[in-house]
Image: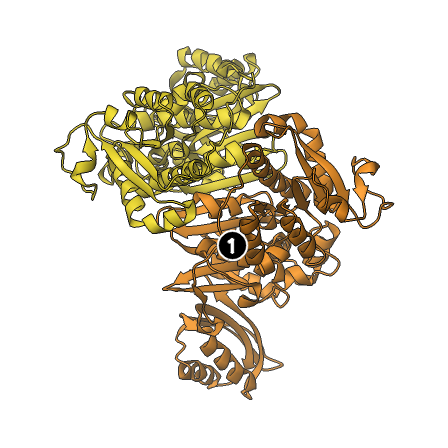
Chain colours: A orange, B yellow
């Protein structure tokens, strides 16, 4: 029986330092729960001399990956460097060398999780990635294990804290750029915020959740994603008047034997569980045949919540090591296909500027009707008499993405159209 | 290596039949995830001839516990009969005979969980009880395992669906008895509803949650519980006016090295996460040093959600059996004491009827002041001029239970007091 569990840490950024900090500060509590001490043996960094706010002893630092990957005393490699490379290559090498892997890397798991899980399964090691989605919320383990008896039918999630912070600020009346700058000042958004605000980060996370929930192979490239950059203060005001808030929603749904997945801003009715998720918080709503509906809510990012998830994985790995067995949770393997985005159906909110003259509404309605899109309501919101422009807000009944895209394409080219400002899907 | 995992089911009520149903209907999916088939070998019932809506084959039924406890082919005993005896004795016998135990029994786990966990630990078998609290919500595993790196500081929970259903109806204007009858008609409340409406059920569940969260030994008898029977429609109206809803809250909190626990109705501010938990749904809000705040929400009762939790446990036990090792999660063992209820602090809402004449308010205020209870607001709500009675609603600042109880005792005996109608603790 092992006397301790030895860790090689890849990366000493915010999450790496946070993990080291908790592991040392709570060493006794963790040892008690795991059965043996869990210790960091080596830490891979790019630059030995970089200033770090951490108590990691200098002698643990190394710039040579092989000091970790080829050290037979190291049981677990904890990858917290982020980004695709070299993280992917290092994790693969670790698994090949028979080391268990714990990672917080959504990008690598979203793109190569399937391959990595298969490798881990063959090599008989654990591959855990709780911290890759939802920070401190234990969503991965709940999907991989606790809902085993359920056929999951839908997931709706707020899984990007940066955008949810910005949208919460916009709900309060700020415009997009002010809210973004505010988020950047608080450290919630990066200097280059595109990965977050364009929905890329949420799509990575959704690929992971959907793959586990539906036991299928959903790739990030399967997921159409739209961001929040084009949303305007006005849309939030109109949403509010109609009893909605606007959220960036990652959704996955089983429709017959296919899977629908998408990330985009949605109008969420005020009573909906996701409507009250504010600021940087995350929430995942799961529909399953046995549980009906369940929600997990918490902090989706930050050093401490992420370290909490890394530590949960480490605790599980360490227990498995002590007892001599990896937790073979298996590779998602069913063959469900991802449905073409164009075939997905949604209700739409469309805001557009048109010439303020008779017959205009009839013409717009005709285009929509020609595409079999039925209109639930039209409201003329504002009129600029000098410019002779009227603003219309149209709510449609459910229609396919393809039909709506085609209709908007035609509407854009009409001589009476000044601009199609926004279109936002509407949740039930 | 085991070729299958064999189950002895104790009880064929709603949860037992639900569990059998899922196990057979989803046999393939479960076998795939666990690694081997999971099969029910024997089912203990009280009466072989009772009519049951189930597809359990008659030849599996037995009235002799030893057919399960002494069958060496049975690996896991699943206890879903409920109540203290004979459930407790049967579980103990199962553990002694080296069988893993999965149970949905909150009463036995709340009262004897400590003892049972120690027995299981010594005997090297698993004892899982996910279904004992929160139905399909995986709260037990989250506390036992996923929050390992956290020092949990508080739990606030709605963990009794019956009372939450009744309170939700009362919020809509029904009075207590109508709401109770409504709940009984829908099968949400039992013919004798005392266990639920008096807070006993919630106290059992809180004892389990608090023991795990604080790694301490919290007994049901440590938990002061008050029910919802005395709440009146008027209190819901006043709560609404002040921006609150009334919920039956199970709360546990670490205060220095002690633990505070209680179950009672509380005024919850509208923006609070627990305020929007409606009907029979449950929610558990957890504060921890790493995660900050997390919430789990879902169906807290019913055959299907409960079976989902039993199956999650069964999946874990079966995997452990296949890999030859029980999951030693350990027995909570730290020595934290439960603080005397009288020393706990809360803000209070107090509604009382007093004589409608000058000096009355001063007299009441004086009694509160004498007990060092400071008043946040007093509103005179209604006056019955004929009866010369005025109704006062007092909100206090934080005060100890002891002081408030003493003050109310004195106020009740004042000649100017007609009645102390209600006092409800107020959440922050």
- Nearest the camera: A270 or B354? A270
Above-or-below relation of B403 to A164: above
- In which quadrant is the N terminus of chain B drawn? top left
Above-or-below relation of A339 to A274: below
- Nearest the camera: B167 or B415? B167
Q: How many marks?
A: 1
Q: Residues within 10 Å of mark 1 (few under 14, many from 20)?
A: many
Left or right: where A105 falls relative to B102? right
Q: Residue furthest bottom?
A: A415
Q: Quadrant of residue B163?
A: top left
- Nearest the camera: A257 or B1? B1
Q: Residue furthest front?
A: B1
* Residue at horizontal 60 percent and vertical 33 percent from the top: B150
Whole-percent x and y of residue A242?
Answer: 47, 61
Above-or-below relation of B222 to B351: above
Whole-percent x and y of residue B395?
Answer: 51, 27
Whole-percent x and y of residue B349?
Answer: 47, 27
Q: Chain of mark 1?
A: A
- In which quadrant is the C terminus of chain B drawn? top right
For the question of whether residue B200 can be seen, the reply is no
* Residue at horizontal 35 percent and vertical 28 percent from the top: B105
SS of the residue at dot 1?
helix
Q: Report which residue position mark 1 lands on.
A: A209
Whole-percent x and y of residue B203?
Answer: 40, 24
Left or right: where B385 falls relative to A277? left
For the question of whether residue A29 can be seen, the reply is yes
Above-or-below relation of B124 to B59: above
Q: Residue furthest left?
A: B49
């Amino acid at each position: 029986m092992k006397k301790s569990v030895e860790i090689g840490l890849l990366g000493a950024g915010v999450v790496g330092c946070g993990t080291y900090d908790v592991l040392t500060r709570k060493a006794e509590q963790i040892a008690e729960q795991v059965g043996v001490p869990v210790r960091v043996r080596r830490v891979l960094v790019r630059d030995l001399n970089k200033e770090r706010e951490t108590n990691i002893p200098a002698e643990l630092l190394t710039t040579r990956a092989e000091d970790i990957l080829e050290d037979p005393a190291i049981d677990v490699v904890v990858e917290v460097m982020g980004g695709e490379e070299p993280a992917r290559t290092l994790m693969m090498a670790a698994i090949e060398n028979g080391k268990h892997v714990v990672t917080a890397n959504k990008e690598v798991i979203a793109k190569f999780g399937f391959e990595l899980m298969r490798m881990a399964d063959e090599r008989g090691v654990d591959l855990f990635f709780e911290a890759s989605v939802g920070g401190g919320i234990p969503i991965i383990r709940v999907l991989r294990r606790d809902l085993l008896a359920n056929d999951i039918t839908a997931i709706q999630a707020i899984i990007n804290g940066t955008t949810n912070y910005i949208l919460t600020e916009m709900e309060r009346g700020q415009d997009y750029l002010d809210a973004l700058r505010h988020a950047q000042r608080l450290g919630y958004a990066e200097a280059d915020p595109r990965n977050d605000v364009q929905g890329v980060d949420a799509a990575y996370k959704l690929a992971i959740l959907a793959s586990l929930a539906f036991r299928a192979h959903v790739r990030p490239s399967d997921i159409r994603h739209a961001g929040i950059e084009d949303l305007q203060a006005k849309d939030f005001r109109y949403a509010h008047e109609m009893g909605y808030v606007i959220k960036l929603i990652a959704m996955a749904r089983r429709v017959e034997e296919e899977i629908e997945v998408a990330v985009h801003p949605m109008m969420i009715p005020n009573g909906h569980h996701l409507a009250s998720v504010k600021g940087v918080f995350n929430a995942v709503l799961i529909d399953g045949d046995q549980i009906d509906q369940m929600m997990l809510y918490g902090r989706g990012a930050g050093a401490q919540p992420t370290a909490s998830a890394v530590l949960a994985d480490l605790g599980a790995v360490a227990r498995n090591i002590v007892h001599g067995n990896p937790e073979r949770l298996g590779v998602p393997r069913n063959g469900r296909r991802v449905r073409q985005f164009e075939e997905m159906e949604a209700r739409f909110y469309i805001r557009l500027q048109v010439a303020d003259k008779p017959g205009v509404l009839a013409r717009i309605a005709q285009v929509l009707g020609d595409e079999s899109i039925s209109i639930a309501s039209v409201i003329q919101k504002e009129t600029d008499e000098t410019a002779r422009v009227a603003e219309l807000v149209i709510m449609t009944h459910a229609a396919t993405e393809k039909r709506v895209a085609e209709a908007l394409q035609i509407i854009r080219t009409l001589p009476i159209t000044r601009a199609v400002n926004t279109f936002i899907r509407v949740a039930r």
